[in-house]
Image (cartoon, helix red, strand yellow):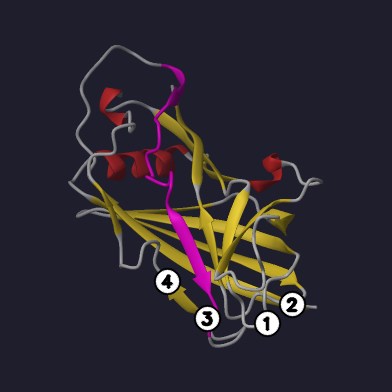
Amino acid sequence: MRKLTLTALSSVLFLSGCGAIIGAIAGNVDVGDPLALEGTEIVATSRLDSTALEVLSSSGGDEETKEGVSNVEFDDLPLGLNITRFRNEVSIGSSITVTRPDDGFPERFTLTDLSLNVTITDDVGSASIESSDFVEAITFAIDASCDRDIATECDYTLDDDTDLTQAVLVLAINNARDARDIVSILRSNGPNDITASSSFTTESTPELAGGAVIIELKSLSATVRVG
């Protein structure tokens, strides 16, 4: 059994607006999907070999464009609030798509050491946020409906013994100044260029070399702490 380590990138571009002044807020405030990660695909492939990795974007181009993400609720936060924490929980979901590996589809594979890094940039500055923990080891089994002999891609679902909560990553900033900086970048100075990068290792027999691993991110919740 060999380990295959993959790194993938995905970029999204969206517009964020200025906030309207409302009454005082304290505690945790839901801010929707501020990093525009919902539905973003991370695609990793190793078509050359397990050490020479080619990085593909989420949808065949350099970036995916989302204009004025409707569920970003920063517009309802008063400017100048004392923001002390930013937290975004992201799941890789219960299903992963794999395109045909060189040696065919394995019955199952284990994904380990999964991490996620997101960088947000606008015309003035940039900030990065990295998952505070790793998805240590989760196993995916091939969908029974996939004909491994002829299929060009197959879906894999979480093994029955794997809890979906094991597939959750937490992007958290607990430093007040850094949390305010990232919120400021998301709210001000025009469009934001957001790049998500992920690294992980797969273990299987046969290995997945030659195929692409496609992970669709799901933004479970995002909050800022105020006060």
Task: Identify which residue is drawn at 56% across, 51% down.
Answer: 131
- Residue 198 in percent (x, y) is at 53, 62
Pointer 1 or 2: first along the chain: 1
Front position among marks 2 and 4: 2
Give the distance between the C-alpha atoms of the residues marked 1 and 3, in whole angstroms.
Answer: 17 Å
Could you classify mark 1 by the number of other residues whose Cα lies within 10 Å: few (under 14), some (14-19), or many (20 or more)?
few
Q: Which secondary structure, mark 2?
A: loop
Mark 3: few, some, or many residues within 10 Å (few <14, many ≥20)? some
Q: Residue at x 42, y 71 (%)?
A: 56
| Residue 78 in view | no
Magenta range is 26-47
What's under tag 3, amino acid-wise? Leu
Residue lying at the far top of the rendered structure? 23
**Residue behind mark 1:** 103
Q: Nearer the viewer, mark 1 or mark 3?
A: 1
Whole-percent x and y of residue 113? Answer: 68, 61
Q: Which three-letter amino acid code belongs to the residue tagged 2?
A: Pro
Residue at x-position 68% and y-position 42%: 164
Which residue is identified by label 4? 56
Q: Is 78 situated left or right of 2 in this image? A: left
What secondary structure is found at the residue carrying circle 3? loop
Above or below — where is 7 with respect to 50? Answer: above
As displayed, is residue 151 above or below residue 19? below
Circle 3 sits on which residue? Answer: 53
Q: Quadrant of the N terminus?
A: bottom right
Give coordinates of residue 153: x percent, y percent: 56, 66
**Are the residues at dot 1 and dot 2 in contact (C-beta closer than 8 Å)?**
yes
